[in-house]
Amino acid sequence: MKARTLRFTLPIFFLGFFLAGNTTLHAQKIAPADPAKSLSDTVYRELDEVVITATRVSKRIIDIPYSVVRLNYSNYKYDRKIGSNDMLSAVPGLFLQSRYGDHDVRFSIRGFGSRSTSGVRGIRILLDDIPESEPDGQTRLEALDFNSIGRIEIVKGNASSLYTNAPGGVANFINDLDFERSSVVQFNQFGSFGLYKNGFKAAVKTDNYRLLTTYSYVNYDGYRQHNSEYWHILNMVLEATPSAHTKLSILGYFVDGAIKLPGSLTKLEFEQDPWQADPKSVSRDEKRITTKGRVGVKYDATFGGNLNNEIEVTAFGTIKFFERTAGDYRIINRYGLGLSARYVNKLKFGSRHNEFSVGGDLFTQPARTEYYANIKGQKGDDIIQIESEDISNMGFFISDNFEILKEKMFVLLTARYDNVVYNQAEQTLPSRTDRRPFNAFTPKLALNYKITPMIALYTSFGWSFDAPAANELGSADPAYLFNQDLNPQESRNFEIGIKGSHYRWDKHWFKRIIYEVTSFDIRIDNEIIPYEVLSNVYYRNAAKTKRSGVELGAQVEIYEGLTFGLTITRSNFRYLTYEARVISIDTSGTFIETDKDFSGNIVPSVPEDNVYVSLAYSRPIGRHVNIFAKASCQGISGLWVDDENTDKTNDYNLLNGLLGIDLTFGKFNIMVSGGVNNIFDEIYVGFTNTNSASKRFYEAGAPRDYFVSVNLGYAF
């Protein structure tokens, strides 16, 4: 089935199906979950699970008036676990495009993030609640090791009233400290195109502390020419509990690796050989070498007569060294210091509960960049330019959640003020300095109405603010270091949705149904758009953009252990008013400048339809064996490649299969899994390089590939 054939009637049909169920079940006492009947494929876990990302206060998902997803390690423990797209493709509203291998995945939520040519933009990325995103919002995901990550929390939609540079949402990757006893696990994974990943995980638990240490080495030759990569990833978390109501955590990681960059192709090159590299990328030996680390300290305490007060303070430091050979040869050294704090007070006004919180974040990052000539991927002897920069972000937020109707209706008010400042100076001739500050106040109002204890209607309206990233501020005018015409992207965001769960513990068929449906409407002013001149990427503002869509996610336990999953995302994103100058190259190599009107065109690099369907079976066999099987299919409609809508990629459907077995013998554990992705070996465009003046829009997605995982564990 082609993804583009789906219409809004599908979400409405499924919503009606769910609500037609026996809603009186929710008035009954909910029985505890049977571990033997756990849903290994459940994208939406129980709605009474707690997350902290959505409101910066620990709350159950059913009580949060936003669209929120939480995944636990059990959801993806049998999967490939290399890139984020291996685990997160089933999340409705989230569109992932893997570029240059597995560690440069483009995240897009409701279109935010689709403009990124490298890394993640418009979505705040956290690792253990600490910003992995830099002060300007740019994020690379090299530090994520999914053998170490125990749960993932994703907020879909505007989170600017709580986090800086988060108009599309927040993704929080949290290391696994929820183990019951000390253990050690040795990981091994092998796959197509020279993939192998080896490492270990050590977990130590005592009465007063927990220690988690993981190390992974990843090597991948890649499925395209000039596309190899390797990574060393070390993660460590120490959590101590000095008293019953205090917690002190020390968190750190170290990453070292490199990735070759194959570049984008023209349509003719893609049709001739989609696995080839851009000849210019090969001649330059374009690559990215990364060494970075982070250390953080977090203190959390609850106090007061009723333990109704909480304070959390986090301090962290980062060191990042990059070498890049795209065009010139750059050596970038960055050092960062950050501090965040929040206070939470829970009390009653009469019989009504109120939850108030206030907090702030500070993150500053000075950097030094050295420019050299790129001689076939090697650094030239003479330095061309030295630039120093400092990017800082300071923000304060306030939140209040008040119970209007007893155990029925809650109103959540949040607001944030952000000040983002860029300073840059050249230390060699020509000597120039530049500075650009951006600031904004972003409020948000949200309502949550509980139809039953486990069905909730929610809606929200708020403003968002997204300052340009440092690389987006680059100027084509030699008189300035920063683009003086590029303004922040601002938007007004409205959403309405329903989430719920149906449990029938005394039944064998359709025992459990978990679902969420969300409709959103977004109006954007000054949307930041990439364009290209002489192979250099610059950015400009489009006047006005309208985005509307529907997201549906559902999990149905058809029979004991047999689970059907469905996610549907339908998007309609268009430029309302947008005029710009287009630079193109004709067949003789001559540059042509034309003023064009893109009003009414579809926003590129975002599919109109994104559908994911899965069928999974998990079953214990006796006390020592658990088997798992899963088949999934993802359908993506074609993507426009530029603002002019000159070409659209083909629709594609990816069929994947996975088998796993988990064996436990006393204190020993062996888990074996294997799978095939893109079973029919479909050739498709997996990443679009938006608005390329040289028409190099196309990068191939992964062909058919296989993997096998073998994990050996021992529990003390």
Image (tube, rainbow, N blue to C red):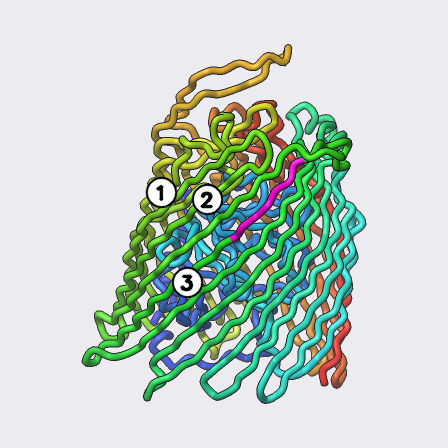
Inspect the image, locate mark 1, and give the three-letter code of the amino acid beneath it. Glu
Quarter of the figure with residue 685: top right
Asked if residue 692 lies in the magenta stretch, the reply is no
Please tell me the numbered disc located at residue 54: 3
Residue 349 coordinates in the image, percent (x, y): 20, 78
Residue beneath disc 1: 490
Q: CA distance from mark 1 to mark 3?
A: 20 Å
User: Which residue is depicted at the point 71% across and 36% down?
Assistant: 286
Say if 176 sits above or below 368 in the image: below
Q: Which dot, 1 or 2, sits closer to the camera?
A: 2
Inspect the image, locate mark 2, and give the three-letter code of the amino acid beneath it. Tyr
Q: Is residue 551 visible?
A: no
Residue beneath disc 2: 422
* Region rendered in magenta: 365-371
Inspect the image, locate mark 3, and give the three-letter code of the amino acid beneath it. Ala
Q: Secondary structure at mark 1?
A: strand
